[in-house]
Image (spheres, helix red, strand yellow):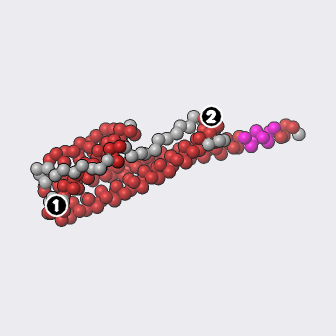
Amino acid sequence: MERYIIGAILFALAIYVLVMYNSLVKRRNMVENQKSQIDVELQRRFDLIPNLVEVVKGYAGYEKNTLEDVISARNNYIHTKDNTSDALQSNASLSGALSRLFALSESYPDLKANKNFLDLQSELSNTEKKIAYSRQFYNDSVYRLNNKIDMFPSNIVATLFRFKKEAFFETTDSQRANVNVTL
């Protein structure tokens, strides 16, 4: 009888570990999926930028510095996207450069009325919304995973199988600052 009780306890414990392990794997995979979604939206943004720059070049040829800043920030992000903190900083620089580019368009009424520019600006705006949503969903997934890793008794299984906490997407100091637009 005693063997059956011990066997039942060990069986229940094994089932618990299996369920908890699968739950942790599911949450880790959700975080990875959300990270990929952010990359997809950022890539979409980067694909739109060269077209936008080309349209603006025709109208604002002498605003070369602003256009170069946008291109430089885009290229910088591509080289740093494997390092999350550097990528966030590069993304902040790109957002600032794009803000200056759109502010620049206010000085060129013909550019503001150009259908290609308006379409690209709209696409970029929609993409920015998708990026924000993807970041929020990513942070929610990270929150759930990190809670599972920290909370008892799932923390025992997480420690046993070496699950690591993930970092949240956070706003950098440069992203919190007002964008300085000079024309």
Q: Quadrant of residue 86?
A: top left
**Total label count?**
2
Looking at the image, which is closer to me, 56 or 103? 103
The amino acid type of the residue labelled 2 equals Leu
Q: Measured from the top left, where is residue 115 in percent x and y?
A: 20, 64
Q: Secondary structure at mark 1?
A: helix
Residue carrying label 1? 111
Residue carrying label 2? 160
Q: Measured from the top left, where is residue 178 in percent x and y?
A: 29, 50
Looking at the image, which is closer to me, 15 or 86? 86
Q: Is there any visible trace of residue 55 in the rendered image?
A: no
Name which residue lies at 40% across and 40% down.
84
Disc sitting over residue 42 in the figure:
none
Indicate whether 110 appears above or below 24.
below
Q: Is there any visible trace of residue 178 in the rendered image?
A: yes
| Furthest-right residue in this view | 1
Badge 1 or badge 2: first in the primary sequence: 1
Tell me the quadrant of the picture where the N terminus can be found.
Answer: top right
Q: Measured from the top left, where is residue 165 in percent x and y?
A: 52, 39
Which region is colored magenta? 6-13
The amino acid type of the residue labelled 1 equals Leu
Q: Quadrant of residue 153?
A: top right
Q: Secondary structure at mark 2?
A: helix
Give the Cα distance between marks 1 and 2. Answer: 60 Å
Name which residue lies at 19% across and 58% down.
105
| Furthest-left residue in this view | 62
Indicate yes or no whether the magenta region holds residue 179. Answer: no
